[in-house]
Image (cartoon, helix red, strand yellow):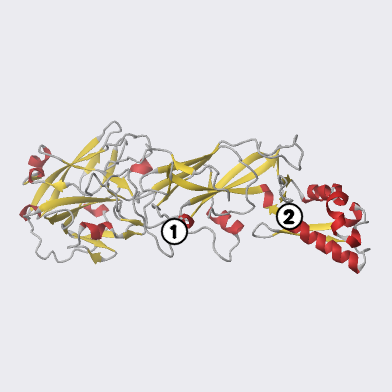
């Protein structure tokens, strides 16, 4: 694939902080009572103090760009967990307790912040610095609460450091489905991940906390959004059957992801600020590849493809290995006038410009016209035969990889003549690629910036397919 083609690039600035309890939404976005958070049966609370204190939180959207999404399904928070870490510094602090957010939140769409007065069990008796981590929309992530104990896939996390929790591999970034939501967690700020809870933010009563000093938390989605739109219509990069007066138009496009992650870290890993590059999970089974050995790429495409305008949410992929970087396969179905094209063929002879034929019959007619001048001298036994005799009976089959087999027969030919006829079919097969149902494919790498390929969490990437740049590939083809 020609890497000089335009590449998919993000459509908005990487800086985005989302309100912990919703962004730019009208009405009540969260009924996050404790029963809404995935829970297990209460366990022995051990030495956790049964007393409580209150923390006053201010959740702020500080993004320059606030228009990324105003649709409730993309921003709604259905549950939330606040995790409290204690230690002399963020790097050494360990998880002490966790609590479900337990109040209604009203966040008008003109609001840039929302306040939460949250009860924290036992935290007032701690002696070191406290740090708070917010985990939102956790139903598909493996996080659960058992009393005030945070668990991941059934294992208690009490005593874990911030780094240990950060590096947990979340198998789902969530979805926009109702009562699931897109998973969110703290967005790294400056040189730290989590805000420090100072003593001025802790209060003995809820009423005192409601009017006291507030602690700011910024969060971000673990997911990145990918979308493909189409504004291409007339095809001007090539003509049909070598006739400059005959051109195709785009009937429709569909698309799929190639090399994409479904896993992510619980919190952005390895970044000092939300706009910076981050580190994604890699492994032998991640990212997911569209092309699977032994399967028909056409069948796979139909099973996994998306329509123009569909939005897909995936995990970050910032690998430097070019073979594993996330790519988009765009399928373009062509038509001429109001008629869809059937099986089409790309003919390439040496350094000559390729010709795109709208049917097998059109290609064979081209071969007949050029029989004497182009081919006959290379086939001694049939060089004196007419074009009609040579191409009297033909068939062209298209294979799963886009290669073709051209078969030529004439029962009146001798054995030697039929051998040359078979050899001619082999030569033509090597010069011809097949396009099923007038469909061709283009591949683009997702670019996070002008000079960096990759997908970063909490960003939106949009490919606007504006034109058919040339004759595409006959099957989805990764960029190596």
Residue 322 visible at all: yes
Residue depicted at x 26% and y 56%: 166
Alpha carbons under labels 1 and 2: distance apart = 35 Å
Mark 2: few/some/many CA within 10 Å (<14, 14-19, 20+)? some
Residue depicted at x 27% and y 37%: 61
Residue depicted at x 8% and y 58%: 50
212 and 79: which is toward the camera? 212
Question: Tag 2's secondary structure?
Answer: helix
Q: Return the residue at label 2.
A: 431
Tell me the number on the disc at residue 287. Answer: 1
Nearer to us of marks 1 and 2 is 2
239 and 310: which is toward the camera? 239
328 and 366: which is toward the camera? 366
On screen, residue 144 versus residue 14, left or right, reads left
| Image coordinates for residue 357, horizontal then vertical, percent | 74, 46
Asked whether the residues under the numbered discs 1 and 2 touch, taking CB atoms below 8 Å apart as contact, a structural biologist would say no
Residue 176 visible at all: no
| Image coordinates for residue 106, horizontal then vertical, percent | 25, 38
Tell me the number on the disc at residue 407. Answer: none
On screen, residue 350 versus residue 278, left or right, reads right
Mark with earlier residue (1, 2): 1
Residue depicted at x 28% and y 45%: 273
| Image coordinates for residue 199, horizontal then vertical, percent | 7, 46
What is the total number of numbered labels drawn onto the structure image?
2
Question: Tag 1's secondary structure?
Answer: loop
């Amino acid at each position: 694939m020609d890497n000089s083609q335009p590449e998919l690039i993000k459509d908005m600035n990487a800086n985005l902080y989302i309100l912990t309890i919703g962004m730019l939404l009208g009405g009540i976005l969260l009924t996050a009572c404790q029963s809404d958070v995935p829970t297990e049966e209460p366990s022995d609370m051990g030495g956790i103090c049964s007393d409580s204190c209150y923390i006053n939180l201010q959740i702020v959207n500080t993004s320059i760009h606030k228009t990324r999404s105003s649709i409730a399904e993309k921003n709604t928070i259905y549950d939330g967990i606040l995790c409290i870490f204690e230690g002399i510094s963020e790097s050494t602090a360990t998880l002490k307790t966790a609590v479900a957010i337990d109040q209604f939140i009203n966040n008008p769409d003109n609001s840039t912040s929302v306040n939460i007065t949250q009860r924290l069990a036992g935290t007032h008796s701690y002696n070191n610095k406290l740090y708070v981590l917010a985990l939102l929309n956790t139903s598909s992530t493996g996080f659960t609460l058992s009393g005030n104990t945070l668990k991941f896939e059934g294992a208690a996390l009490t005593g874990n450091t911030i780094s240990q929790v950060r590096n947990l591999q979340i198998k789902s970034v969530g979805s926009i489905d109702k009562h699931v939501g897109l998973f969110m967690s703290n967005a790294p700020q400056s040189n730290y991940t989590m805000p420090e809870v100072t003593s001025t933010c802790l209060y003995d009563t809820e009423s005192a906390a409601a009017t006291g000093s507030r602690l700011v938390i910024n969060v971000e989605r673990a997911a990145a959004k990918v979308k493909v739109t189409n504004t291409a219509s007339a095809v001007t990069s090539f003509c049909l059957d070598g006739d400059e007066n005959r051109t195709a138009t785009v009937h429709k496009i569909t698309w799929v992801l190639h090399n994409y992650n479904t896993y992510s870290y619980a919190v952005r890993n390895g970044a000092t600020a939300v706009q910076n590059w981050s580190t994604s999970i890699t492994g032998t089974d991640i990212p997911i590849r569209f092309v699977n050995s032994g399967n028909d790429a056409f069948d796979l495409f139909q099973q996994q493809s998306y329509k123009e305008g569909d939005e897909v949410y995936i995990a970050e992929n910032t690998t430097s290995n070019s073979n594993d970087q996330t790519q988009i396969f765009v399928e373009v179905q062509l038509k001429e006038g109001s008629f869809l094209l059937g099986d089409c063929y790309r003919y390439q002879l040496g350094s000559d410009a390729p010709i795109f034929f709208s049917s097998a019959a059109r290609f064979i007619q081209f071969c007949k016209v050029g029989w004497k001048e182009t081919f006959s001298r290379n086939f001694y036994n049939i060089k004196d035969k007419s074009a009609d005799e040579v191409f009297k009976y033909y068939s062209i089959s298209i294979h799963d990889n886009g290669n073709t087999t051209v078969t030529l027969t004439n029962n009146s030919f001798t054995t030697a003549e039929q051998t040359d006829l078979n050899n001619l079919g082999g030569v033509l097969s090597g010069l011809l690629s097949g396009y099923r149902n007038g469909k061709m494919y283009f591949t683009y790498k997702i670019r996070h910036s002008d000079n960096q390929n990759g997908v970063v969490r909490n960003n939106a990437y949009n490919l606007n397919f504006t034109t058919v740049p040339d004759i595409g590939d006959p099957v989805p083809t990764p960029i190596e």
